[in-house]
Image: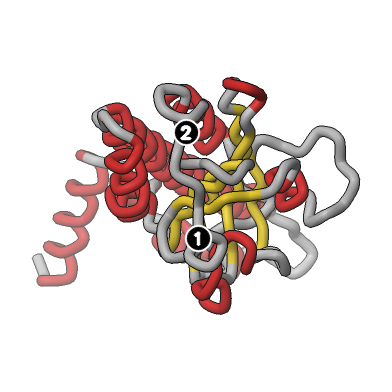
Amino acid sequence: MTDADNLTTILTNEILKDPAVVLDNPKVMRALLEITDSSKGDNVLDLRAIFAARLEERMKRLEDTNRTVIAAAYDNLTGTNQMHRAVVALLGTDTLPQFVQVLNHDVANILGVDVVRLCIEGDKPHGSKPVDPADQHSSTIVALPTDGAASYITQQRNDPAPKQVTLRRASELRTTVFGTFSTDIASEAVLRLDIGVQNTRGLVVFGSRDPKRFAPNQGTELLVFLAQAVERILRRWVA
């Protein structure tokens, strides 16, 4: 028996032991179909080859879909874990200054944003100490005029019911919130707050240098959860 005969015997035995080696390999299947095509006449149409090609294309699309679904699920799980960590960090604060510090550092790092601002309507967002207008942008807390929160969300348009979370390219009014940092901010997430005490309203605004970090087509469910948690925590101190 020649070496070629030996090789043929070995290959045959291996294929018979595990036919999936051939059936699951698109390149091998395509080569077998091409050999079959070359043996038939020009006036013969082999529907098996057409079916196999379509099936292969559908399998590719299915694999791509599966990868997309898995990636989306992973991103969602990661985002949920990040938001839970941020809320737990905020829940551990005992004073408003500590809350602001955690918001500005821990939460900003967890969520991967460049600047955080806590904006509260009225001239006393600290609870007792008025904010100096000349110095209000030097810290995380910013004082807004009455109805200033809704005005910033709607960019001064007449909208009686602004959304709780707005994701967008940075507003032309961003200097109101970010002050001297406004030139660096390319996109923002604006969280509307209804603190509830004496009808106090405010905002948490996350700013990013990345213009694609926040966009209107992104999901907002986790940020709504964060806004609702912040509202309840702030009621401890803001009145």
* Residue position for label 1: 136
Residue closest to the eye, 221 or 142? 142
The total of numbered circles placed on residues is: 2
| Badge 2 density bin: few <14, some 14–19, many ≥20, Cα 10 Å | some
Q: Position of residue 15 (x, y in %)?
A: 25, 47
Residue type marked 1: Gln
209, above or below 67, in the image = below
In the image, is 86 to the left or to the right of 44? left
Residue type marked 2: Leu
Residue closest to the eye, 40 or 79? 79
- The residue lying furthest to the bottom in this view is 183
Residue closest to the eye, 10 or 75? 75
Residue closest to the eye, 201 or 110? 201
| Badge 1 density bin: few <14, some 14–19, many ≥20, Cα 10 Å | some
Q: Position of residue 79 (x, y in %)?
A: 40, 41
Residues under labels 2 and 1: Cα distance? 24 Å
Q: Earlier in the sequence, mark 2 or mark 1?
A: 1
Foreground label between 2 and 1: 1
The residue at the point 72 percent across, 69 percent down is 172
Locate residue 19: give its quadrant.
top left
In the image, is 112 to the left or to the right of 186? left
Secondary structure, mark 1, is loop
Secondary structure, mark 2, is helix
The residue at the point 53 percent across, 45 percent down is 204
Q: Position of residue 224 (x, y in %)?
A: 56, 32
What mark, if any, has residue 61 been given in the picture?
none
Residue 39 visible within the image: no
Location of the N terminus (image quadrant): bottom left
* Residue position for label 2: 226
